[in-house]
């Protein structure tokens, strides 16, 4: 999918969008067109889409392999969507089930929305990878296994008493046994590497093989390897050699009789220049773009935490944009520094995940009271407590909404796809700067690490986010004296003036104690406090957000309402249902606080409202409380995104109920 | 944003980028219109007066001065200064001030904190600000008690202190803030006393001139909950034998008629106090605040008895130059521009691995 498809669903070619309807029935690769192989030539089949999962030990380099295959695929011009899935441990015990790391990639010649429910191809680098993933693989799918690892001990480690490669348990699959390790070592004989060093390149051998199978361009990967190991040319060349050996193995061995073509998705993409981008990268770029559009320096105060750290890493690379990154001593200092910088006139940002938000709560409350612009980026992960650091979840919505003492409203913005994180960052910055308020941006692990093609925007068309600092007195006392009142508000936005230190005549003191309306002086007056509480709420309630768009081509009676990263799976499920002739309406919220003005009216139009969430019903709770609508929750909190098929079934049940 | 390029050098290395005041200032210029609300007789008044009195000496544009505080009695301080100010949340002032100072080198940023704020709830931020050496001046008002919450023991209270929360006496060993700061790699550490305006001002002067984080511990009397805590250091008769006044380059002597001196114990390498005689006079340690190693400063800080406060050193214990965080942060930005050119957003977004779709 692309971030540029503005209307949620349905406008794409419906006929094409039976999309994933087949994969539950048949795991094998569809072959709408097949070219008969000539003598001595291998057969090439054309596919419209493929789902590949690379799985191995956490030390096997599966994420890198997946990333490279994704880059090759992106540069080839397919639409794609990815799902990295890895353990929290850097090196979990080798060969164990908890140590398995995988990377799933869905690519197609048409518009797709999710990383796919089930793989057509599983690459299993060891018995643990096979055991951990086989349950997701439909019968008929292809499985490529590294036979070198299927020896007694590694198999016993994961409970295989007999070899699944020999005991017939994989009969329903199309298994390709390949001695990946041996072949890699053999291919690298001339490099004079130790066995251990040579073995490390087996992921590149596998990548080469898969690149051959799917006709991927290879120049990018070779250039990447040479750049990555620029300081170790011998290792670079060894990896390139392993990569080429894998390709050649596919081309020569009889076991791989067929290769596949998935044509570029030329129909899907509007004219433009594209790149592949992950959510965290898009978000980082969005922040840099927001600072540029606001003409303010960007200041990131952050403490490393999975899955948000990549934003800190990325922003720290771009100091030539005037970006200051401060790795703080803890989460509290991270947001504290960002708030201090905001007081000084920077675009202050802090990045974190759920546990970090908990620690930052008091400072977020201070920012609410100080009414300074501040972005709080929460890359949600499984909770509570440490929870599942590398898995995705949407369970911080109520924390973002209410997780502070006192009445402390904070606007909330949520991106819906990896590429959309760019636009969401700009939108969050717009709200923070216009209304002088902290703003939550709720991404999650799935968006953060997943990737998709992104139409690169024209920088001249980015929104103007410039704001005026206060420069002089804004109030006249009864005696005619001109003074500066730090809490005298803009009548439209209710924003207070942003008077940065260094501005003569505007010296003022602000703080977390309740302030008198206008002057900002300390005030314990009951009526004033009541007024200030209501005013801060009214400011957030009054934030301008676009009306909610509903995709309802056939006057449905059931509405599915989502927010955040569930956009892809929900839209895919809706397409399936419509392909089956079902009638269902879809809407997706970017703004969770305040809600779009028309949300209540939209909800009223439907007999049934279903809210799928990767939590126990947090948006549904808000909807029910605010609009008195009997919203039905459909929930999953297993650390993984919804599968389209599963959602389609659930939505069908809701329609029929 | 104010133009920082027009900043005039002030002669003080820490304040080179801070614009100077156009006209001569007086103490009155630094008094805000807010009524001061500390308890009558509180030591905070004396410190406020000293700071307001000292500020004109710096000659800085007062709009470029910011006071940031946490929570506690002393943290109301910013409201009374006619500068920019932020009364933040408990313990976090050093973190907030770090963000401000590291993004605005044209500001003179001061942190006002107390023993509970800085050493208990905010201990982590304090030590990290010190090790980073951000251009902050931290005034730590130490009254050895919790005042605003009405009288519980603090992390600097003496062991066995009877308070509302410790009716049978407190069990915690106290921090020595100066020792703590030295251990946290502080480049400037000083101690002074609220009632000694001249000494306090002298220490502020040196702190202001110091590039990097300066920690100034100010012994401050809480006349409601811990009255007389520092009496031994203030009483004319007792102080002579209790206070060790440190001056850079001067022999460390105190007591009636300067009868006592600090020497190094050859057996242990530690410092000890001796009666000065003709024989040992040459062995009396000469104070070197600029010593590269903090070892001797630390040993000096340990001379004080935590219960009686006898042999309490005051003055600048350590003042050394080392790289300043915000300067280096700015230099990295400049270097990045030199190496990669000024950031080009279109080029960044385009990356080097893209493809074009033609309609």
Image: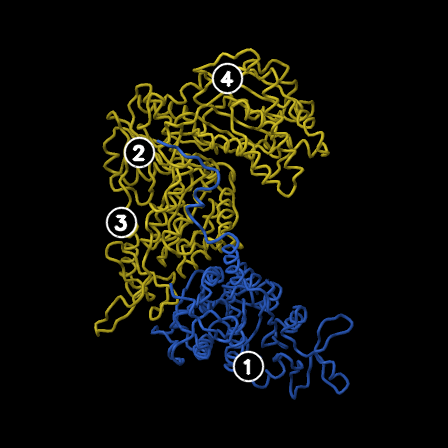
Chain colours: A yellow, B blue
Q: Chain of mark 1?
A: B
Cα–Cα gap, marks 3 and 2: 25 Å
State whether residue B150 appears in this view. yes
Q: Secondary structure at mark 2?
A: loop
Query: Where B181 sits versus B28, above or below?
Result: above
Cα–Cα gap, marks 4 and 3: 59 Å
Query: Where A463 sits versus B19, above or below?
Result: above
> Image check: A337 left or right of A86?
left
Callout 3 and callout 2 share a chain: yes
Callout 4 and callout 3 share a chain: yes
State whether residue B42 appears in this view. no
Callout 1 and callout 2 share a chain: no
Cα–Cα gap, marks 1 and 3: 58 Å
Cα–Cα gap, marks 2 and 4: 36 Å
* Image mark for residue A542: 3
Residue at label 2?
A: A7
What residue appears at the point 28 percent right and 52 percent down from the top-left corner? Answer: A539
> Image check: B358 left or right of B190?
left
Q: Secondary structure at mark 1?
A: helix
Callout 4 and callout 1 share a chain: no
Callout 2 and callout 4 share a chain: yes
Q: Chain of mark 3?
A: A
Query: Where B142 sits versus A115, above or below?
Result: below
Q: Nearer the viewer, mark 1 or mark 3?
A: 3
Pick out the residue farthest to the front: A39
* Image mark for residue A44: 4
Q: Secondary structure at mark 4?
A: strand
- Residue B238: image location, x then y, percent: 60, 83
Within 10 Å of the Cα at label 4, are there few (<14), some (14-19), or many (20+) other Cα atoms?
A: many
Q: Nearer the viewer, residue B233 or A85?
A: A85
* Image mark for residue B234: 1
- Residue B212: image location, x then y, percent: 54, 67
């Amino acid at each position: 999918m692309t971030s540029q498809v503005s209307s949620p669903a349905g406008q794409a070619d419906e006929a094409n969008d039976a999309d994933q309807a087949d994969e539950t029935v048949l795991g094998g690769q569809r072959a709408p067109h097949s070219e008969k192989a000539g003598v001595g030539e291998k057969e090439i089949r054309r596919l419209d889409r493929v789902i590949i999962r690379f799985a191995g030990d956490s030390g096997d380099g599966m994420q890198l392999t997946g990333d490279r295959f994704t880059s090759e695929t992106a540069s080839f011009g397919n639409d794609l969507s990815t799902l990295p899935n890895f353990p929290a441990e850097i090196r979990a015990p080798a060969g164990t089930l908890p140590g398995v790391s995988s990377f799933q990639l869905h690519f197609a010649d048409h518009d797709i929305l999710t990383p796919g429910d089930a793989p057509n191809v599983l690459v299993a680098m060891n018995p643990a990878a096979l055991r951990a993933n086989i349950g997701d693989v439909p019968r008929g799918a292809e499985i490529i296994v590294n036979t070198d690892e299927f020896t007694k001990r590694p198999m016993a480690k994961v409970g295989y008493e007999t070899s699944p490669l020999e005991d017939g348990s994989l009969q329903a699959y199309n298994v390709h046994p390949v001695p990946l390790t041996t072949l890699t070592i053999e291919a690298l004989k001339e490099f004079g590497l130790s066995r251990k060093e040579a073995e490390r390149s087996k992921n590149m051998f596998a990548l080469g093989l898969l690149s051959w199978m799917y006709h991927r361009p290879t120049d990018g990967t070779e250039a990447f390897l040479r750049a990555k190991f620029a300081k170790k040319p011998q290792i670079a060349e060894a990896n390139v050699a392993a990569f080429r050996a894998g390709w050649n193995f596919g081309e020569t061995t009889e076991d791989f009789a067929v290769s596949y073509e998935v044509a570029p998705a030329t129909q899907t993409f509007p004219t433009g220049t594209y790149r592949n981008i992950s959510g965290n990268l898009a978000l980082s770029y969005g922040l840099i773009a927001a600072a540029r559009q606001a003409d303010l320096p960007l200041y990131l105060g952050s403490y490393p935490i999975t899955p948000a750290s990549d934003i800190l890493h990325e922003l720290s690379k771009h100091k030539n944009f005037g970006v200051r990154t401060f790795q703080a001593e803890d989460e509290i200092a991270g947001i504290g520094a960002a708030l201090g910088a905001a007081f000084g006139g920077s675009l202050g940002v802090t990045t974190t995940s759920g546990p970090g938000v908990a620690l930052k709560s008091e400072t977020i409350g201070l920012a609410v009271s100080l009414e300074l612009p501040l972005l709080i980026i929460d890359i949600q992960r499984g909770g509570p407590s440490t929870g599942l650091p590398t898995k995705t979840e949407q369970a911080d919505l109520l924390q973002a909404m209410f997780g502070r003492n006192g009445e402390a409203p904070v606007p909330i913005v949520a991106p819906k796809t990896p590429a959309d994180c760019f636009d969401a960052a700009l939108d969050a910055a717009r709200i923070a700067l216009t209304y002088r308020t902290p703003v939550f941006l709720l991404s999650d692990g799935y968006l953060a690490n997943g990737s998709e093609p992104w139409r690169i925007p024209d920088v001249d068309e980015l929104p103007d986010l410039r704001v005026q600092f206060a420069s002089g007195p804004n109030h006249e006392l009864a005696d005619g004296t001109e003074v500066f009142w730090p809490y005298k508000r803009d009548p439209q936005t209710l924003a207070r003036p942003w008077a940065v230190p260094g501005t003569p005549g505007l010296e003022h003191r602000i703080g977390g104690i309740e302030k008198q309306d206008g002057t900002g002086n300390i005030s314990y007056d009951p009526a004033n406090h009541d007024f200030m509480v209501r005013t801060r709420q009214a400011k957030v309630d009054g934030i301008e957000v676009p009306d909610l768009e509903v995709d309802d081509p056939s006057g449905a009676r059931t509405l599915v309402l989502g927010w955040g990263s569930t956009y892809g799976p929900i839209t895919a499920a809706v397409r399936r249902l419509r392909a089956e002739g079902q009638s269902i309406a879809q809407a997706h919220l970017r703004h969770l606080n305040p809600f779009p003005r028309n949300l209540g009216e939209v909800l009223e139009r439907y007999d049934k409202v279903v809210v799928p969430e990767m939590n126990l019903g947090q948006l549904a709770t808000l909807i029910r409380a605010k609009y008195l609508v009997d919203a039905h929750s459909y929930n999953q909190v297993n650390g993984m995104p919804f599968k389209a098929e599963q959602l389609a079934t659930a939505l069908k049940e809701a329609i029929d109920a | 944003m104010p133009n920082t390029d027009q900043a005039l050098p002030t002669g003080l290395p820490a304040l080179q980028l801070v614009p100077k005041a156009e006209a001569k200032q007086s103490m009155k210029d630094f008094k805000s219109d807010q009524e001061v609300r500390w308890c009558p007789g509180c030591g905070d008044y004396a410190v406020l007066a000293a700071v307001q009195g000292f500020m004109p000496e710096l000659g800085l544009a007062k709009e470029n001065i910011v006071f940031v505080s946490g929570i506690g009695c002393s943290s109301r301080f910013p409201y009374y200064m006619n500068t920019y100010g932020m009364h933040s949340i408990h313990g976090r002032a050093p973190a907030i001030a770090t963000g401000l100072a590291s993004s605005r080198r044209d500001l003179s940023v001061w942190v006002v904190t107390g023993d509970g704020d800085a050493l208990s709830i905010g201990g982590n931020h304090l030590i990290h600000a010190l090790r980073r050496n951000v251009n902050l001046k931290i005034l730590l008002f130490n009254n050895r008690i919790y005042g605003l919450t009405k009288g519980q023991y603090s992390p600097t209270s003496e062991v066995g202190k009877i308070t509302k929360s410790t009716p049978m006496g407190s069990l915690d060993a106290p921090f020595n803030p100066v020792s703590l700061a030295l251990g946290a790699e502080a480049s400037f550490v000083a101690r002074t006393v609220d009632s000694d305006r001249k000494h306090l001002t002298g220490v502020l002067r040196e702190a202001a001139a110091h590039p990097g984080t300066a920690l100034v511990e100010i012994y401050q009397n809480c006349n409601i909950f811990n009255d007389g805590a520092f009496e031994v250091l203030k009483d004319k008769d007792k102080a002579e034998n209790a206070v060790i006044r440190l001056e850079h380059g001067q022999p460390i002597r105190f007591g009636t008629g300067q009868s006592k001196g600090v020497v190094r114990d050859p057996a242990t390498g530690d410092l000890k106090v001796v009666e000065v005689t003709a024989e040992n006079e040459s062995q009396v340690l000469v104070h070197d605040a600029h010593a590269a190693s903090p070892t001797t400063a630390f040993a000096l800080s340990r001379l004080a008895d935590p219960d009686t406060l006898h042999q309490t050193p005051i003055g600048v214990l350590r003042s050394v130059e080392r790289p300043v965080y915000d300067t280096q942060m700015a230099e990295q930005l400049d270097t990045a521009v030199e190496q990669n050119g000024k950031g080009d957003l279109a080029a960044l977004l385009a990356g080097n691995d893209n493809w074009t779709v033609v309609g």
